[in-house]
Image (cartoon, rainbow, N blue to C red):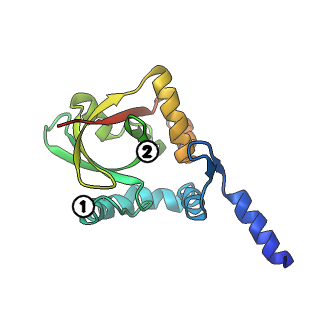
Amino acid sequence: MWAPLRSITVLLVAFRRYSPRRGRRLRLDEALLDRVLLTRVGYVVMLRVAPPIDKALIPRTGGRLSFGGLNKVGLLTSTGAKSGQPRVHPLALIEDSDGLLAIGSNYGRPNHPAWSANLLAHPECTVQFKGPPGPYRAELLTGDARAAAWASATDFYAGYEGYRSSCAPREIRVFRLRPVAG
């Protein structure tokens, strides 16, 4: 193999971390997104640019496409804790055997995200993720369930560990969103 090509191949393989949850190394597109999100520019884009785009794009594509990672972001519609009005929040969602995981990291900022307070006050919500919107019920995880969900979250996105240290002493809320039959 041509030496420069071999060097590039070795670099790309090292760049793609192993994901225990997926049982494989990240694909190149997943690894690039993971790395970009860990930069200051990625942080600002995901905080300020992506949410308004996702609010428009996700409903138009039936939940199959989002700005921030193809099919990793969904729309959570919760009831405002104080206002009682519907609030729409684009969130990275992690598929779990019992539903979806929503991580209240708030990008490592010191306060909990508003949507997490909404779910604590009104656990019934609507989620549009990889398909049409459907009814869900949120559960705040604690103890072993939270620890297992947190392990899945940090495997899903390595930046959650950095968020945890930057928002300390606040504990990041982790919710399981379970589909409601009916």
Give neighbour class at mark 2: few <14, some 14-19, many 20+ (Cα, 10 Å): many
Residue 131 placement (x, y as % from top left): 29, 55
Point out which mark residue 177 bears: none
Contact? badges 2 and 1 (CB < 8 Å): no
Whether residue 85 sits left or right of residue 15 in the image: it is left
Whether residue 97 sits left or right of residue 164 in the image: it is left
Residue where numbered disc 1 is placed: 59
Specify the quadrant of the image occupied by residue 49.
bottom left
Please say if 73 is above or below 147.
Answer: below
Specify the quadrant of the image occupied by residue 122.
top left
Q: CA distance from mark 2 to mark 1?
A: 19 Å
Residue 25 placement (x, y as % from top left): 64, 53
**Which residue is pictured at 55% across the width and 59% down the height?**
30
Between 100 and 159, the residue placed more toward the observer is: 100
Residue where numbered disc 2 is placed: 94
Kind of residue indicated by mark 2: Ile
**Which residue is pictured at 76% across the width and 71% down the height?**
8
Residue 178 placement (x, y as % from top left): 31, 35
Between 122 and 74, the residue placed more toward the observer is: 74
What secondary structure is found at the residue carrying circle 1? Answer: helix
Please say if 139 is above or below 11.
Answer: above
The quarter in which the N terminus is drawn is bottom right
Kind of residue indicated by mark 1: Pro
Farthest residue in the left direction?
Answer: 84
What secondary structure is found at the residue carrying circle 2? Answer: strand
Whether residue 166 sits left or right of residue 113 in the image: it is right
Give neighbour class at mark 1: few <14, some 14-19, many 20+ (Cα, 10 Å): some
Specify the quadrant of the image occupied by residue 50.
bottom left
Which one is earlier in the sequence, the residue at label 2 or at label 1? 1
Whether residue 112 sits left or right of residue 28 in the image: it is left
**Which residue is pictured at 52% across the width and 62% down the height?**
41
